[in-house]
Image (spheres, grey):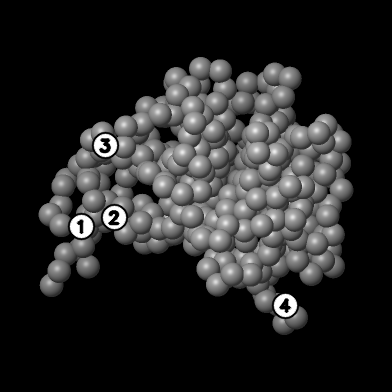
Amino acid sequence: MSLCYKFKPRGATAGWTAAQGPLFPKGFRSCQDAFVRKEDGRYQMWFSWGDARLIAYSESGDGLRWEYPTIVLPALTGSSWEGHEVCRPCVVKHGGKYQMWYTGKMYPTEFSDAASCIGYAESNDGLNWQRWCEPVLRPQEAWEGRGTTYAHVIWDEDEQLYKMWYSAGEIREADAIGYAVSKDGITWKKFGQNPILTHRDGRYFEVSKVEGGCIVRQAGWYYLFYMGVDGDGITCIGVARSKDGVTGWVRHPSNPVYAATDGTQDWLGARGPSVMVDGDTVKMWYTGLNRLGRSIWIIEHPGASLAFDENAPDERGYGECHGEPNYGVNTCIARF
């Protein structure tokens, strides 16, 4: 009989502090997929409100205490692609307009198959949105399976391009991360060698899938914060970097940089990162899971630099998930 070791990381590493949350009061038991930006000293958050299957909005003065949410984009009754749920927003303000890319979902019925696509909407105030009538990114390639989702878009001023990192694959959990570019945010050209980031056999936290990326550009690097899904379906948050945002990705040696924390309401997993460099701090809003629901949390990295030494020792101390076991920090070992 051969042995296989599962390494279950817990908590934060790589300089990230302990998590704070949930950020919304009791009663908001299914808030997730936050996208946060800052404008005129105020934090703006668009997020998935899972119980109602829609996108909501809130503001905050400090990123911790948030106002009562407002519904801004519900599912569109009768739509063939966003009739059952809309979720997973990403917002860019460009040319005086707010632009949103989001996921539209259909569930399996006697009349339709399960599917998800990426939609687009525009707004003058971030609250009242005008939708584009058709999806702007559909699953078409073999690796994209039945769904495209988790769009993260930036406007590159130098190249005069919108750049999108998106996930695709199965409906419940996407399988991998792809890349596309657009001149107008509506017509997209997919990268010819997608997917650009896939699961990694060497680390159990992402041995099954990777998805849900968020890009931060800093000092000539693209930093991709993403979700790893392990063999038990548990999610953690890792980070990788690339010079061009497409090829040559290098993972942080101590990934995942944040996993669930025992004894808190996010003990069952962490997912859906939204990351911002805010002054001399990096802030990450994410979805924390437990058996009762999902809620939005925050974790911080004192010091604005995201730079890391790819050859540095692994802070968690568990090495690769093969060969002789290394009993490192917060590991859980199982025999198969």
The residue sitting at 36% across, 31% down in the picture is 308
Q: Which mark is residue 112?
A: 4
Mark 3–mark 1 CB contact (< 8 Å) = no
Q: Amino acid at mark 2?
A: Gly
Q: Tag 1 or tag 2, which sits nearer the N-term? A: 2
Q: As rendered, which of 63 and 266 lies closer to the eye?
A: 63
Mark 4: which secondary structure?
A: loop
Mark 4–mark 2 CB contact (< 8 Å) = no
Mark 2–mark 1 CB contact (< 8 Å) = yes
Q: Label 2: how many residues lie within 10 Å, few (<14), some (14-19) or many (20+)?
A: few
Q: CA distance from mark 3 to mark 4?
A: 49 Å
Q: Which mark is residue 202?
A: 2
Mark 3: which secondary structure?
A: loop
The residue that label 3 is drawn on is 311
Q: Label 1: how many residues lie within 10 Å, few (<14), some (14-19) or many (20+)?
A: some
Q: Amino acid at mark 1?
A: His
Q: Residue furthest bottom?
A: 110
